[in-house]
Image (cartoon, rainbow, N blue to C red):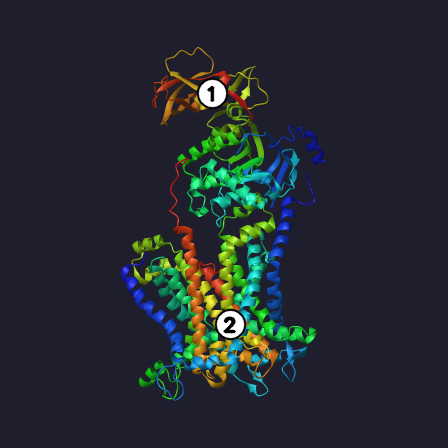
Amino acid sequence: MIPRKLGYALSGFAWPVYALLYTPLALVAYYSLAPAPNMAGHSFHAYHVLLHDGAAFAALRLSLILALCSATSATALGTLLGYGLCRFRSRNARGVLAQLPSLIIYTPIIMPSLVFGISELIFFNFVHSVTGFLAAGLQTMLIAHITFEIPYVALTVFGRLSGLDQNLFEASHDLYADGLKSFLYLVIPVVQPAIIGGFLLGITLSIDDFTISFFTAGPGSVTLPIYIYSAIARKGISPEINALGTLMIGTIIVIALLHFFISRQRERTRQGVFPPPQQTKGAV
Amino acid sequence: MEQMNRDMHEPPLSGAGTLGAISLRGVTRVFAGAVTAVNQIDLDINPGEFFTLLGPSGCGKTTLLRMIAGFETPDAGRILISGREMQDVPAHRRAVNTVFQSYALFPHLNVEQNIGFGLRMRGVKAPERKKRVDAMMELMQIGPFATRSATQLSGGQRQRVALARALVNEPEVVLLDEPLSALDAKLRTELQIELLRMQKRLGMTFIFVTHDQHEALVMSDRIAVMSKGKIQQVGPVLDVYEKPRNAFVAEFLGLSNIFALTPSTAHKVQTVLGELDVAEPLQGASLAMIRPEKIWFYPATTARERPNMFPGVVRESIYMGAATQYRIELANAQFITGVETNNKAAERSWCPGEAVLIELKPENIMLIEP
Amino acid sequence: MSPARTQAEVEGRRQRARLWTTSGPGLVWIMLFLLIPSAGLLAIAFFSADDYGNPVLPLSTQPFQQVAGFSLLGWDAGNIAIFLRSLQQAGIATLAAIVIAYPLVFFILSRPPAVRPLLLLFVILPSWTNQVVRTYAWLELLGPNAPLSWLAHSLHLLPPELGLAPGSLAVTSGLAYNYLPYMIVPLYASAEKLDWALVEAGRDLYAAGIKLFWHTVFPQTLPGLLSGVIFVAIPAFGDYVVPALLGGDKAMMIGSLISAQFIETPDWPYGAALTLIMLAFTGLGLVAFRIFSRKLGGTGETAI
């Protein structure tokens, strides 16, 4: 396929790129080990300071609540959405109406998050001024986060379902499962990896987001990214901020790697523990 | 108006109420875009019968099967399963189970769980379920794979699991949608026989869909040949093969020589070959058909003492092991295909270029509709 | 024989009902909380602003005049410069992403299949850390006291009191870094399906090197490249965090200009008009891109 010489050249290019991808993150970790005031060398001083920083912990708590709640809701809505699109959308339908679901799903993905955030800001402001509901705060952030997480879950689930033999659904009905039972005993177990993947992606996206949170946040609702951003805006980068960043980077990397290896392990046990299938010759 | 007409012409329902019987009356299915996939089909399938729906792809046989299974609802007509009207009953409430062409084994379940799925959905308790699943795996000889995932089985094993998954529910009718088409030729032959044996042993009604005429001939008690949403002919295998009603059936099921005819006198018809004596009376038929294996070959020097004997020249000879197929050129540039079995009685073969005398015996000539 | 409705129509109707009971909640959610709000935002662009910057009647074209650079003080080219800079930044970042993505994708493909997912994961991982964190991380790399800036100082490429960040270079790097995975993933997806037989055939016909790549590999990876360009260029064009943290005053982009109208000195209609123009640019870009990709033979369509 790829000639050996070209392979070397590609490696020579790729490893430095990988290094470059992680250099900024590594620097954050490096600077987080800055010495305590009037001391020399490296230390965990910044982490000690962080440990006693109530505001940072409040922000962390809010971020986690936001991520978990929004990812849970988005997983429920997105799973149903992906399932419906895969199973019940007519394949030969033409026209605007048939395209509408795809258009709706791709809007949150393609829309610049700034426009997303400002739209929400104005909308919630308007709704609040008219009805008194939806004051800016955790609830508005939650709504916004669910909105941008739904498509990712839906696409993950859709991808998994559409890769399946479509006769499976009919087979379940044939074997006495009604719509609900088919969903519970066939669809949910079969797409379970996609649902878990979608949920984790939702959490990741929620924690990754700054812009949309920033515009939908209320005065009292400070998430971790907002906390970091305003800290940098106020007094520049400090070792404590670096410590906080390091912890966030580390957590995400650990979770991602764990998920990767666990799901790979599960794939392996599915395929590898048993001897490979042998050709049967009539009756064994 | 048309509705009334059809009701009047409907055959009376016989054997209604018998477990495992299927009756179709005026079953019609139109797809979006006004494609009529199944057109006013009347059919009776007897309990315990191995019944085959045979036809080319797109003839409506799979749609018919899917309507019996409950995956699709007919636009018009009635479907009776064991004497009960079922056309509007959803698939999960029909005592009918399907073996899919793709097998459709659940990828998240192992063999045992796949087979037990139907029982579980019907609320059969675990101990009872295990007993029945184990018995079925024993019967199908798939016990050793009980805990394997469906994705780790070979084609033949999957086929067995799919069949076991249907049979364990003790359905009144088993529907099989080209279940052997994904297997290689040798395994297919083996499983054909195994399937047949299983059906005879359990005594359930099997409805088998295939486009493979050989498979249909081997397995069926009766077959229905379908084309363009209509049943062309129904009957025991032998009848349909020996006495095809029309040119489509004759050509789809086996090889055939077909000639246009014009009646001359009683028991004589005029064809391109010349005048032919026929055994059966003309009844509006316009074609004469003879199977290649029904053509008799004699050396060219043989005396032409009986009717329907024609001189010809062998133009092509294809050796097929058990038999040899010849292409004979007759007078006025007409060709006819003949087959001779290579048995001990026929220890001769005809070479291309050789002159022969062939005989079409009157009782072997079938008069058929176009 | 002619029932009121054919079975196909009845089933079609039932199917639609099922579609809406399953997909409905999610779709309605997105419509309610994204499509309607963004339509509202765009509508505001046609209102006048009151003293607090809130939209009021009558309808007015004032916001668009402001976008074009007209104000009480006369005409000013500032906005146009900002638009052009945003276009340029997004363009360069996209190009950089393409240039990095191609060799990287084929590097991953040159490795054994078992390690490919891991190599891919390590490309994507940085983009899962928070936007703010990974962006300010570039300040550490390019800031006035960082090693790269010292290097630039010692080579007399940069006045000693300045760093590489904030500035245009930092913004471009930040954008490319942030959106690189969005180029890699679709490109990898299409390169994975590459038909190597065509490349082998091409080796017979087109010799080797760039020409071989251009005639065999490039057309096959085009669909992935095109979705990659869309997924990088659009968000990069309207990005807010990167120019805000790495840009400083001189490298202002459209995103910062828009957000200023909603936060620091509110003028909602003006901000909405800016947004509308930005989206119009994006939309025009998408359409032009569609036409261009059709000509090239790619589809540019996405999965669903």
Identified at 40% across, 71% down, the residue is C96
Q: Quadrant of residue A41?
A: bottom left
Q: Residues within 10 Å of mark 2 (few under 14, many from 20)?
A: many
Q: Amino acid at mark 2?
A: Asp
Q: Residues within 10 Å of mark 1 (few under 14, many from 20)?
A: some
Circle 1 SS class: loop
Q: Is residue B239 above or below residue B210?
A: above
Q: Looking at the rendered structure, which numbered label has been put on residue A209?
A: 2
Where is residue A87 shown, x and y percent of the image? Answer: 56, 52
User: Dot 2 falls on which chain?
Assistant: A
Q: CA distance from mark 1 to mark 2?
A: 86 Å
Circle 2 SS class: loop
Q: Nearer the viewer, residue B252 or B265?
A: B252
Q: Amino acid at mark 1?
A: Leu
Q: Nearer the viewer, residue C222 or A180?
A: A180
Query: In the picture provided, is C49 more to the left or to the right than C211?
Result: right
